[in-house]
Amino acid sequence: MFSLRLDCLFRFGVVRPPYLMPEGDCAVFQKDRFIEDCKAAVADGQKAIREVVLESVAAPSGVIAELGEPTQAGVFPLYQADDLTVINFIWAPYMTLLPHNHRMFAVIGIYGGREDNLFWRRIGDAHAAPALEAAGAESMGVGQAATLGPEIIHSVANPIRKLTSAIHVYGGDFFNPPQPRSQWDHETLTEQPWDMAHTREVFRQADIRFGAGLAAGAGD
Ligand SMILES: [Fe+2]
């Protein structure tokens, strides 16, 4: 996933793991290498994937250099297979995504901005409302990673006024899950079948609001 420039080696005098490089990192993120590392790690489970993701987001400028400076909110797949999906998520300012589960493990790494995760647990009858209650939260900044088990239910928010950039790695085919996945209406907390088209629409509308805000002088 990383390669080191010779000038870095000369500067530090010793070869060190990329995640130990100081800010202004010399570690170079390579998308294809990252995907190969994930493919090699996925059979060992989410802890192994977490190490790969953590190592990458420890050098955020390297990720930006490879994937580009984010300018638009959206869901940008980098790799998709039966056992592994890698997605570049770009969250618009102040947008939220409703509670949902994955039915496969997930690792989330942040390389720009901040991602707030609210975790939920089921209560009572799945057909009753509300069917969930809030159970915990984790706020992640640059360089941090979260590991979510297959049955975790979470909603996601970008709490800041700029785009948030994340790499999400899933232990399965995120877009064609082998087990039915759910989402919950964010107002009533009633359970519904997962709808990827809805998720894309949430990002599309958030990006429209982001663009309209910039045009109106709301800042970036
Ligand atoms: Fe999710």
Image (cartoon, rainbow, N blue to C red):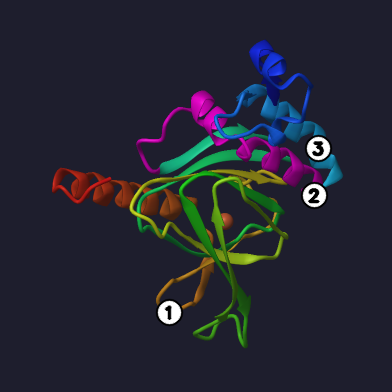
Residue in view at x 28 percent, y 45 percent: 220
Mark 1: which secondary structure?
loop
Q: Which mark is residue 188?
A: 1
Mark 3 and mark 2: Cα distance apart in space: 9 Å
Q: Is residue 153 above or below residue 11?
A: below
State the residue lying farthest toward the top.
6
Q: Nearer the viewer, residue 94 or 60?
A: 60
Q: Amino acid at mark 1?
A: Thr
Q: Is residue 195 visible?
A: no
Q: Please indicate whether residue 42 sits to the left or right of residue 23 in the image.
A: right
Mark 3: which secondary structure?
helix
The region drawn magenta spans: 46-73
Residue in view at x 37 percent, y 57 percent: 95
Instruction: Report the residue marked by disc 3.
Output: 41
Q: Nearer the viewer, residue 103 or 214?
A: 214
Q: Quadrant of residue 187?
A: bottom left
Instruction: Report the residue marked by disc 2.
Output: 47
For mark 3, does the 10 Å Cα neighbourhood hold few (<14), some (14 to 19), or many (20 or more) residues?
some
Q: Please indicate whether residue 116 sits to the left or right of residue 27 in the image.
A: left
Q: Earlier in the sequence, mark 3 or mark 2?
A: 3
Q: Nearer the viewer, residue 77 or 3?
A: 3
- Are the residues tagged 3 and 1 within 8 Å (C-beta)? no
Residue in view at x 50 percent, y 84 percent: 130
State the residue lying farthest toward the right.
44
- Residue 36 location (% of width, % of height): 73, 27
Residue in view at x 25 percent, y 51 percent: 209
